[in-house]
Image (cartoon, rainbow, N blue to C red):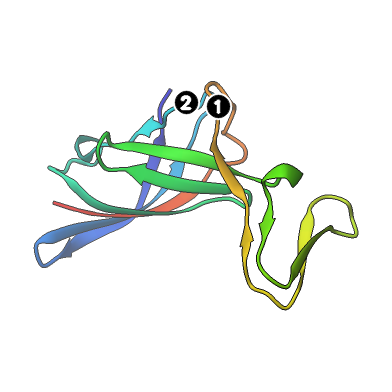
């Protein structure tokens, strides 16, 4: 399907155009990413995309193929790694994990959302900042 882009602010600074917009994913995510091209914005090229997403997701832009990717932040016991002086424990509510100890390292895996997942609720509004020409 397609992204819905709602422009909030746009302008020009020096040689660059900028855009702050809200992007909504729809009910059928395409595995491999959703298209976000310079032409969709009326531009010649995209130089930078920064995105802020909902809790539990990471958004990344692929410049080589002009796709916006959605990744779930996964916390599976087999994939969690704690740094030195840390212990990973289940939280009190039993809904996630916490890190206890004096260390600072903690890793969790990212996995791309699979094809046809309904993202219209979880990612109904992702704020993006785009720079381009």
Is residue 112 shown left or right of residue 18?
Answer: right
Assign a secondary structure to mark 1: loop
Q: Are marks 1 and 2 in contact (CB under 8 Å)?
A: yes
Q: Which residue is denoted by mark 1 in the rendering?
A: 114
Residue 3 image label: none
Rendered residue at 52%/22% (across/down): 115
Residue 106 in picture, x, y percent from top left: 64, 62
Residue 26 in picture, x, y percent from top left: 51, 30
**Residue 103 higher or lower than 35, as above or below:** below
Q: Quadrant for the N terminus, please.
A: top left
**Residue 19 higher or lower than 119, as above or below:** below
Query: Which is more toward the observer, 118 or 21?
Result: 118
Residue 11 in picture, x, y percent from top left: 21, 60
Assign a secondary structure to mark 2: loop
Q: Which residue is denoted by mark 2 in the rendering?
A: 31
**Residue 2 higher or lower than 101, as above or below:** above
Rendered residue at 39%/53% (across/down): 128
Instruction: Tell me which numbered mark, 1 or 2, is placed earlier along the sequence.
Output: 2
**Residue 82 higher or lower than 59, as above or below:** below
């Amino acid at each position: 399907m397609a992204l819905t882009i709602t422009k909030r602010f746009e302008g020009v600074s020096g040689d660059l155009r900028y855009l702050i917009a809200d992007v909504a994913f729809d009910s059928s995510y395409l595995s491999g990413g959703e298209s976000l091209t310079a032409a969709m914005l009326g531009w010649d090229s995209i130089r930078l995309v920064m995105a802020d997403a909902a809790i539990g997701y990471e958004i990344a832009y692929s410049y080589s193929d002009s796709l916006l990717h959605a990744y779930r932040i996964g916390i599976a016991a087999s994939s969690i790694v704690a740094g030195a002086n840390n212990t990973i424990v289940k939280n009190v509510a039993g809904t996630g994990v916490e890190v206890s100890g004096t260390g600072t390292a903690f890793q969790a895996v990212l996995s791309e959302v699979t094809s046809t997942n309904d993202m219209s609720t979880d990612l109904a509004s992702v704020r993006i900042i785009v720079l381009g020409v």
